[in-house]
Image (cartoon, rainbow, N blue to C red):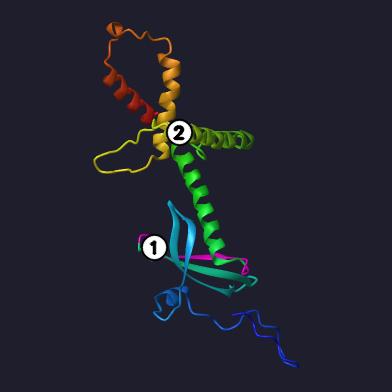
Amino acid sequence: DPPTPKNPGQLGRPRLKGDRLPTIKSIIEDKNTCRTRIILARWYSHYDRPMEIISATAIWYHIGAKPVPIRWVVARDPLGKFPTQALLCTDPSVDPAQILSWFMLRWQVETTFQETRAHLGIETQRQWSDLAIQRTTPALLGLFSIVTLLADRRAKRGALPIRRTAWYAKETATFSDALASVRRLLWAVSIYSMSPEIDDVRKLRAHMVDRLSNALCYAA
């Protein structure tokens, strides 16, 4: 709680904090806790998602640090597909739904960095100069945007295949599928543009070429 105001004539320094509040975990587990049901425009890959939230303001206090007013939000999925999450915001005046929307924007940024690191090598450049890193990192992020735009165009045309395995079934394309599709498109222009279209001079059958191309596009 916020500190109570100092009474006239009261000795000592002003209080920095009030009484200790119950922990967020205990509030979640309390069956008498009232939850508010809202509809979020987006929650991960879902749209118009119903959520049950609990929100209040508090003072974040730690010995040796300045007290910080916060708003905490607990989001619970009534459908039970996502775990309950607790979020904190240093602006107590912000609406809880806005805090959840900001959290979704942060998730997209984190996913972008994870994909660029895994497939394009961002943050793993073997460069000694800080200036070189400052140049290549934006270039790799720009490459991520170009691949995404080209893959989106191919997906709208129905030309973006989704790679599936026996142990992992995907319903939508991932960035690895997008990158492989764009690679195959660009390589086809540079490699096959001078190849003849006469079937009797081909040394490999078309399905063998497709298999080799798919293997190289995903392994590159």
Within 10 angstroms of label 1, few (less than 14), some, or many (20 or more) residues? few
Res 151 label? 2
Relative depth, front residue between 219 and 145: 145
Q: Left or right: 215 with respect to 70?
A: left
Q: CA distance from mark 2 to mark 1?
A: 31 Å
Q: Is residue 95 above or below residue 124?
A: below
Q: Amino acid at mark 2?
A: Ala
What x and y, as percent, mark residue 36?
47, 72
Element assignment for label 1 = loop
Kindly report which numbered mark, 2 or 1, lies closer to the viewer in this rendering. Answer: 2
What x and y, as percent, mark residue 27?
45, 77
Q: Which residue is mark 1?
A: 83
Q: Left or right: 184 with respect to 71?
A: left
Label 2 or label 1, whichever comes before in sequence order: 1
Q: Amino acid at mark 1?
A: Pro
Residue segment shown in magenta = 81-93
